[in-house]
Amino acid sequence: MTLVNARAAIETAINTAVTDADDTVSVVFDNMPFTTPGKTKKYVMVTINFDQATIQAHGAAVDQYAGTVQCGIFTPRNKGSAAAAAIAESVIDGLTSVNASGYTDTYSVKPRVGQITGPTAVTEENNSHFVSVVRCTFTAI
């Protein structure tokens, strides 16, 4: 198991769910180049942080990654909250898909997400987009 595979499992689950629900939504990740789209574009900015890399069982350490996923959902301002809510739902569906009994673990990392919070609105004056955030913890063994 590697950090790259653990990240890829989470990224793929989110990207698949969001683009399947609405292919006009761009999904970008914190480990790739990104140019902020125009004021009329919808997008999700995903940040994955690793907080733990091993657990100390009896004897040698065992790889067990744990961390947090934060998804910023950006929708055009003054268009209502329905678009943001729909995108948030697809982000949540992607996150929870790794916990489903039928999940195919193509990256061999056994990803699992914990408690999901949000969507929480983030209000900022003079921002071209309405922003809401969905967060959760995850593990990969």
Image: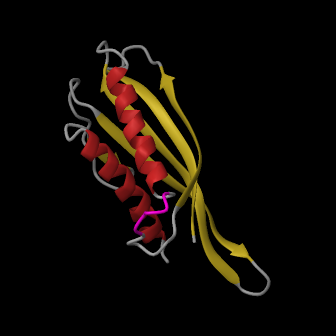
Q: Is residue 116 left or right of residue 58?
A: left
Q: Is residue 103 above or below residue 33?
A: below
Magenta-tinted stretch: 100-104
Which residue is rendered at x = 30% and y = 36% of the image? 43
The location of residue 132, given as percent across then percent down, is 45, 28
The location of residue 121, given as percent across then percent down, is 49, 23
Which residue is rendered at x = 37% and y = 27% of the image? 84
The location of residue 85, given as percent across then percent down, is 40, 27
Within the image, what quadrant is residue 77 found in? top left
Which residue is rendered at x = 53% and y = 54% of the image? 49
Which residue extends farthest bottom? 59
Tell me if residue 103 is in the magenta stretch. yes
Tell me if residue 12 is in the magenta stretch. no
Q: Is residue 112 above or below residue 92?
A: below
- The coloring applied to the image is secondary structure
Could you say which is closer to the camera, residue 88 or residue 75?
88
Q: Main secondary structure of the magenta part?
A: loop
Which residue extends farthest front? 102
Which residue extends farthest right? 58
